[in-house]
Image (cartoon, grey):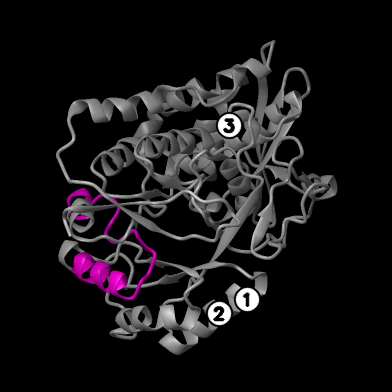
Amino acid sequence: MKSSRRTFLKSGVSAGLGVGTMGASMHNFPEEDYSKLDEAISKPVLDRSLFTSPVIIESVSLLEHDGNYICRVRSKDGAEGIAVGHNISMGYLYPIQVKLVNPFFIGKDARDLDSLIDNVVLHKNLYKYQGYAIWIPIATVEIAILDMLGRIALKSMGALIGGGTIHQKQIAIYQANENRGLEAEESIRRIKHSRDEFNARAVKFKIGGREGNAEKPTGISRKLIAMMRKAMGDDITIYADANGSYNAKEGIEIGRLLEEYRIDLFEQPTSTDWYEDWKAIADAVRIPIGSGGGEVSMRGFRRLIATESVQMVQQDIYYFGGMIRCMKVARMAETKGYVCTPHISGTGLGYIYMMQFVSALTNAGPFHEFKGLAKNIPITCNTSSLKPENGILHLPTGVGSGVEIDPDFISKHKIVS
């Protein structure tokens, strides 16, 4: 198996294709291969040419109402951008947002967003809080700035970070099953229900006990793996998500079982920073491996990609610090012919920001995660229903995020100090 490598075959949303294989010999990666990745990282993401004059940020505010957090950015010229925060985490992280992250951006030129994202971690030694604690607040401000810049330039977020070109207007979805601890038959029933609700052509199910914990019921993963293909049929793409459940030996065993039952992707087989185990599993199996959404390090992704330990990158727009950093990972993956399927945090308007990011990708994966609509945030959109139609999400093509949040809803929010 070590002589075989895997790659995704890029497909249009109408093709309904899952995973393909391509043979190539394994070898050690010399410095020049890393240089290609470093070159991809170094290229600017924001299309600065859309702005002829400075956009000086006058204020950055965090607002809250009934557990919903909104970041509001305003320029000295009166432009405004809004981002809905990562509500699951912001109740814990708001002091970092308000005291350490927001002040850095005040007085800065929003056109310098690439360098601002690089340098914010040096502000008051913010890098010492490395991880979700800093990247979620940074992403929250960045999304609000992109919304503001899009409204100034009359462009969508996707156009701002995609070189002015929209590459994906139709986004095929996969339905994810978040359930662990159920009997196999009940899990499959729920997965089928989710699939059928929006006629999705791809699904994802959970295996393992998450981060090395014992699975419950015992033996459930092997049973599910053996049942899934028959239950879903041959025309459905199936992803398996382990959430870091296995060490190298266990991951290899499960990976080969997934191959036997024709599952299309093995997501996050081992813990995020167990890089040697990622490599060992990748070398021993043919099934493509997805990174999962837990990686927060640019160098971590650089290593995973250079060593062919993953074939699909799944950086989370919030967890990884925003669209600019996520685009750099996607570009690194593209140098290897790999695809990007961003992870979605199940909160706020994450699925809207996911669509904007995917629209800018030239190496988008065939299916993208859909966790349901945000029912507690009143939004309107004139260019998309925002609901999957026959398994397809249609990109909102308005300015900024492409959606409008009800002003009366925003007015209920109070500034967090």
Residue at point 60% right, 79% down? 193
Residue at point 64% right, 42% down? 416
For marks 1 and 2, give the CA distance: 6 Å
**Residue 192: which numbered mark, if any?**
2
Question: Dots 1 and 3: beta carbons under 8 Å?
Answer: no
Q: Residues within 10 Å of mark 2 (few under 14, many from 20)?
A: some
Quadrant including the C terminus: top right
Q: Where is residue 261 in the image (x, y as percent from the top left)?
A: 33, 76
Quadrant including the N terminus: bottom left
Q: Position of residue 188 (x, y in %)?
A: 48, 82
Mark 3 vs 2, N-terminal side: 3
Q: Does the magenta stretch include residue 33?
A: no
Magenta-drawn segment = 250-277
Residue 190 to residue 165: above or below? below
Residue 155 sits in which quadrant?
top right
Q: Which amino acid does label 3 sit on?
A: Gly
For marks 3 and 2, give the CA distance: 35 Å
In the rendered image, which residue does mark 1 sit on?
196
In the rendered image, which residue does mark 3 sit on?
162
Q: Does the magenta stretch include residue 256?
A: yes
Q: What residue type is labelled 2?
A: Lys
